[in-house]
Image (spheres, helix red, strand yellow):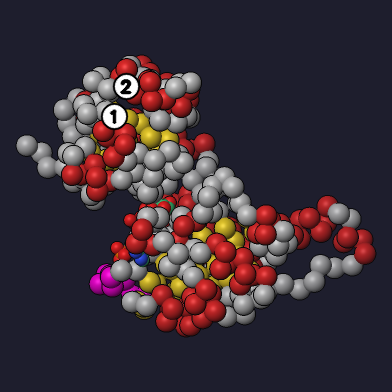
Amino acid sequence: MTGPLMAYAADQLKQRFTVHELWKAPDQAKMLAELSTRVRGVAGGGSHVRIDAGLFDALPKLEIVANFGVGYDNVDAKEAGRRGVIVTNTPDVLTEEVADIAIGLLLATVRQLPQVDRYLRAGKWLEGAYPLTSSLRKRKVGIVGLGRIGKAVARRLEAFDLEIVYHGRSRQEDVAYRYYPSLVEMAKGVDTLVSVAPGGASTHHIINAEVLAALGPNGIVVNVGRGTVIDEQALIKALQDKTILSAGLDVFEDEPRVPAELIALDHVVLLPHVGSASVHTREQMGQLLVDNLVSWFDGKGPKTPVAETPWKKA
Ligand code: A2R
């Protein structure tokens, strides 16, 4: 294990395997050197530990990396593929949970729910009503990354009677929403962006100053995918100078560090990456991580390999 995992999953791993806890070692390089010919599987927790060529070099007998989370930008999956190491993630089991948070965050941002709560607690209601807020009504929502979670968000937004469009690398033939090959063009046509795109080089800072300017002064940005998708400094500037109206963020560029300039802005809503963080869903994710390792070492192949390391039964 490269980092702590919830007991629900860690206990199962310890029952089935000999588990070494890398992050607890006073000298991690020494531990890796001692274990180099014995470690066959890695359970990766969280996005803060990079699993890349350095670790693969240190563990030449490695067969599988089971990542906790659907996003695996913390793993160099292409390099794993080149070396014949399987990478698995935890898709589907968190889709609805993260979509719920996307909607909750959107509503909280548009109607300023945390700010309104703070207002009441500060006793200000006794002095008068909270100022009127912006509205979800008549908003047009552009989804950045219409994948499993993006589609679950879109399904929920349909119930709110909002117009939905999307941007991704390719048009999806089986959806009726309008497709924008250009993110800037989509931003010009909507006032609300919901980003559910993965991290990594291909999405790095795709929501930049130009996109935010195109979104305009009524613009709201919600991000539940990866922090690196948004140019955070450009976002801070756009919020400070009112290029856009507000933002609701569950993910940040350098978690768990959140820029003081963002925290200083009272009109944004900030969550500490809790999209999938319910007991129910985290247990499902932990179980899928365990199931991938058990299935692999039982000789039955990985359950949910990522695209870069496809599995074909021999
Ligand atoms: O690009 P497409 O057509 O393959 O659509 C995928 C989109 N996507 C991108 N969109 C714009 N620019 C890119 N460079 C780019 N790369 C990928 O993101 C697809 O519609 C979506 C990802 O969907 P799924 O693979 O089904 O992932 P899921 O389960 O919805 O999770 C999305 C992300 C995770 O990677 C974590 O970062 C986070 O949500 O939890």
Classify 147 as above or below 65. Answer: below
Describe the element under mark 1 as helix, strand or loop.
Answer: helix
Give the labeled residue for mark 1.
58
Separation of marks 2 and 1 at Cα, in angstroms: 7 Å
Residue 284 on image: x %, y %: 41, 37
Quarter of the image with the C terminus in it: top left
Q: Is residue 158 magenta?
A: no
Give the labeled residue for mark 2.
33
Describe the element under mark 2 as helix, strand or loop.
Answer: helix
State which region is magenta.
170-177
Residue 12 on image: x %, y %: 38, 22
Classify 117 as above or below 293. Answer: below
At a point 16% along the width and 28% down the height, the residue shown is 299
Closer-to-camera residue (59/19): 59
Q: Which mark is residue 45?
A: none
Prevailing secondary structure class for the magenta stretch in the rendered image = loop
Residue 24 on image: x %, y %: 48, 22
Classify 63 as above or below 21. Answer: below
Where is residue 86, by image quadrant?
Answer: top left
At a point 51% along the width and 54% down the height, the residue shown is 253
Residue 279 on image: x %, y %: 52, 36
Classify 3 as above or below 151. Answer: above
Amino acid type, callout 2? Ala
- Is 101 placed left or right of 145 in the picture? right
Quick check: can you spot residue 190?
no
Quarter of the picture for ligand 1? bottom left
